[in-house]
């Protein structure tokens, strides 16, 4: 479904429809396919109203219906998109969304957006499980084998992990897009007028300075922040069109430096960047020397990945990433919050925030499967 269609579908939703989507989302903690009886009970609405809403949501592609020993429903990415958009709009983070994607990657879709003040933003929807199992193997550390934890929750975890890395690196003055917000599987950052490094190729006027900035940022990320990007290359460095400042993007695969394989990942990151600048600009920097300069004086990590993340973030924060904003709440409390959220006026059809399609600037669509999963060039 295109964003234009998604926005149109979202704007058709009533507060009752959103209530049903939220109930299914909460119920996914216990069920892969949520029984209709549970949806009726937890939504605190009549069977007739719930059935009518589910039929509408199914037609809009926001839920899937399954009929076996019982009739059950599960959210789709479209339904999850609608919930994320609703929360971001309600919080005043975004007001408009571009009708076409900036980029479609293996594990995400990226769109231009605007906030109510007209500031240009980027919204990245994580979509794990579409083509790659690389991330899901990693996130199974926390997700485990629970069948009711779906791709949606793994995508939520990916988004929150990326947002965490962006906040930590931005606060350390590493050149990354300024983080704005995260909700469910959607990460929002400020937009950068830029081209990806792979697109610039030999067009840099000061390649030595650009490489130096990237290496400084990698060093700061490792030494001060304590993490490694884990997937750095010319595909996920943006070059500002204004002053050629490089910005490192696409962070969901970061690891703590205490991870036993962190040095190997750091070496690979450096090798990718140094090879590019040697090939395109004949700038040679010795990989081993660069690695030594960055890691000197810091003890190599020895922890397994799960231990490294738990030591850095804590079990509670990781649990919040997996289960969402109500991770520390009981299901009963989560349902009570849904009741409060959608019953303030007592009228299901009123006071829902509308989303607009961003039409002022036509954005070019970039659909290369090899593209970065973050903010590519407009």
Image: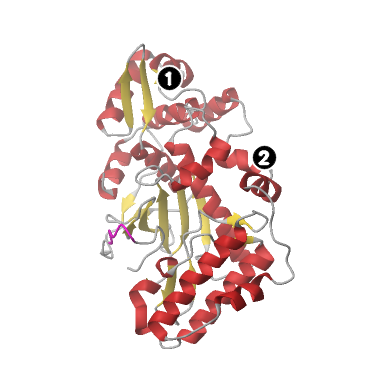
Main SS, magenta region, reads: loop
The x and y percentages for residue 298 are 73, 66
* The magenta segment: 366-370
In this view, which residue lies farthest toward the bottom? Answer: 205
Q: Tell me what residue is drawn at x 25 percent, y 30 percent.
A: 59
Q: Is residue 242 visible?
A: no
Q: Residues within 10 Å of mark 1 (few under 14, many from 20)?
A: many
Q: From where the camera sits, is residue 186 visible? A: yes
> Cβ–Cβ below 8 Å for labels 1 and 2?
no
- State which quarter of the image contains the N terminus: top left
Q: Residue at x 46, y 55 (%)?
A: 188
Decide whether residue 235 is among the magenta residues. Answer: no
Marker disc for residue 39: 1
Along the line of sight, the residue nearer the viewer: 258 or 167: 258
Badge number at residue 316: 2
Question: x, y percentage for residue 284?
Answer: 49, 84
Tell me which residue sits at (52%, 65%) in the image.
268
Q: Please name which of the two marks, 1 or 2, marks the residue nearer to the observer.
A: 2
What's the distance in space between the residues labelled 1 and 2, CA to CA?
A: 28 Å
Taking depth in this image into account, of 279 and 251 the one nearest to the observer is 279
């Amino acid at each position: 479904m295109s964003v234009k269609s998604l926005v149109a579908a979202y704007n058709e939703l009533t507060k009752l429809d959103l209530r049903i989507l939220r109930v299914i989302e909460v119920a996914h903690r216990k069920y892969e396919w949520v029984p209709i009886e549970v949806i009726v009970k937890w939504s605190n609405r009549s069977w007739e109203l719930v059935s009518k809403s589910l039929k509408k949501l199914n037609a809009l592609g926001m839920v899937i219906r399954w009929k076996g020993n019982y009739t059950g429903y599960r959210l789709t990415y479209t339904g999850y998109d609608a919930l994320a958009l609703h929360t971001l709009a309600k919080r005043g983070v975004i007001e408009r969304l571009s009708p076409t994607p900036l980029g479609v990657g293996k594990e995400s879709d990226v769109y231009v957006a605007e906030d109510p003040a007209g500031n240009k933003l980027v919204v990245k929807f994580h979509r794990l499980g579409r083509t790659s199992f690389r991330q899901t193997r990693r996130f199974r550390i926390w997700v485990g084998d629970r069948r009711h934890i779906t791709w949606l929750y793994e995508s939520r975890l990916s988004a929150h992990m990326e947002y965490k890395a962006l906040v930590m690196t931005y606060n350390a003055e590493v050149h990354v897009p300024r983080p704005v917000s995260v909700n469910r599987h959607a990460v929002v950052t400020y937009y950068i007028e830029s081209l990806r490094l792979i697109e610039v190729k030999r067009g840099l006027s000061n390649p030595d300075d650009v490489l130096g900035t990237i290496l400084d940022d990698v060093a700061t990320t490792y030494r001060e922040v304590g993490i490694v990007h884990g997937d750095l290359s010319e595909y996920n460095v943006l070059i500002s069109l204004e002053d050629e400042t490089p910005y490192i993007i696409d962070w969901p695969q970061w690891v703590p430096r205490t991870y036993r394989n962190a040095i190997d990942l750091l070496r690979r990151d450096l090798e990718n960047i140094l090879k590019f600048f040697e090939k395109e600009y004949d700038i040679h920097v010795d990989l081993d020397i660069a690695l030594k300069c960055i890691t000197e004086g810091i003890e190599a990590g020895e922890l397994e990945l799960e231990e490294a993340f738990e030591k850095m973030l804590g079990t509670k924060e990781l649990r919040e990433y997996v289960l969402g904003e109500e991770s520390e709440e009981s299901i009963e409390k989560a349902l009570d919050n849904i009741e409060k959220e959608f019953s303030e006026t007592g009228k299901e059809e009123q006071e829902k925030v509308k989303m607009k399609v961003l039409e002022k600037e036509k954005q070019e669509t970039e659909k290369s499967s090899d593209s970065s999963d973050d903010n590519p060039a407009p």
